[in-house]
Image (cartoon, rainbow, N blue to C red):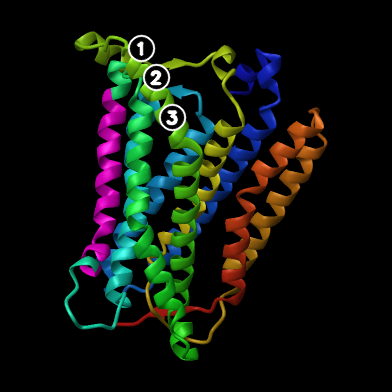
Amino acid sequence: MIKILLQNFNTAWAIPWYTVMVIINVMGLAYCAVVYKRSLIPRDGKDSTYRNRMRIMGVIFTLVSAYRAIGVWSIPYTFRIPNTVAEVSFAGLIAYAMLRFNTYLPATDDARANKFKSFITKTPYILVGCLVLSQFIDTWGVITHFVLRGVFVETLWGIGFLSVLPLAIIQLRRVFSIKDKEAVERLRILRYSAIIIAAWCVIYCMYRWVFTLPGMWGRALYILETGLPELETGIQAIINALGIRTRTSLEYRDWGFGFLIWHSAYFSILTWISIFLMKAPRPREISGKRNAKPTLITLALTAIALITLITIIGLPADIDEKIILFFLGGLFLVPIAYIFVLEIKGVKLKTIE
């Protein structure tokens, strides 16, 4: 990757960004392994199906994120197939966590039937459905070179997360409405998950529906007016799609700020959200015994992260490029800091029935 970027002076400045993203994901893999080991406890069979599925989906997304961060140039099917599994897993993590939240802490205490509220509680299925459908369109679009593939895929992502936004806000309000100290402590992990999911849905919906989709649909309508290019069909189109090739430096000339923001969020923020959700958020009891090992690991990861960011300052780049790289490299410090606070405050917990 670095050799490819060095082929063109205009892309050589992205080497620090690429290095930071790789380091982030190596750290993510290490932390994912720790969380995976911890998720095997307790072995009492409680919520076992929920825990197993969340564990598997979290590992899948973390592994694929690391693969894509290292092999970001791989196109199209060298990342399309694992990427499909990863993105569906990400949707599954959020959807399953929200559905289980409804079980542990119903969105309302009102026993009266309400079709609208009942529909809201089922919206996680819409999220998964939208992302699964987007994968089929993305795959078909890659094979046929359908020029409107991107706008349809991103619109489905936008619809999916917009559909669960009301439920995310309801669940956030619900968990914060509980004031009993003992109950608050038992529901602490559920509270964290509600904050993370609601924040992600709000930020993503604003980014997608306010900043990107209007422009994408504007360009799409212009293409429709001027005429769609002919689609590639037949067995040769599939063979071409399955072919493995590496991008040249000339293909990175579209590496703008939007590209780096999207990839940085995917390779950092989404990874750490997945690692958190693979813990299978649920009510827990307090045993009162602190576990210092995860805290020490988090401190070590945070130290490495800070060293990485400081190193960026000494790299040969213009000041504006350094600011952008420092900002992008610092994106992952937010979830790491959040997990760090969680671990500092945390105690060794066991699930309750």
Residue 78 at x, y percent in the picture: 38, 25
Q: Amino acid at mark 2?
A: Tyr
Residue at numbered disc 3 = 216
Outermost residue, front direction? 225
Q: Is residue 293 above or below residue 80?
A: below
User: In the image, what residue occupies the spot 38% across and 70% down?
Assistant: 171
Q: Is residue 352 above or below residue 198?
A: below
Alpha carbons under labels 2 and 3: distance apart: 10 Å
Disc 1 to disc 2: CB gap under 8 Å: yes
Nearest to N terminus: mark 3 or mark 1:
3
Q: Which residues are magenta?
A: 117-140
Residue at numbered disc 1 = 226
Main SS class of the magenta portion in the image: helix
Disc 3 to disc 1: CB gap under 8 Å: no
Residue 206 sits inside the magenta stretch: no
User: In the image, what residue occupies the spot 50% across and 90% down?
Assistant: 181
Q: Nearer the viewer, residue 234 or 69?
A: 234
Q: Amino acid at mark 3?
A: Met
Disc 2 to disc 3: CB gap under 8 Å: no
Numbered label attached to residue 222: 2
Which mark lies nearer to you, 2 or 3?
2
In the image: residue 337, left or right of residue 31: right
Kindly tell me whether residue 237 is visible in this rendering.
yes
Residue 133 sits inside the magenta stretch: yes
Quadrant containing the N terminus is top right
How packed mark 2 is, by other alpha carbons closer than 10 Å (few <14, some 14-19, many 20 or more), is few
Mark 2: secondary structure: helix
Alpha carbons under labels 3 and 1: distance apart: 15 Å
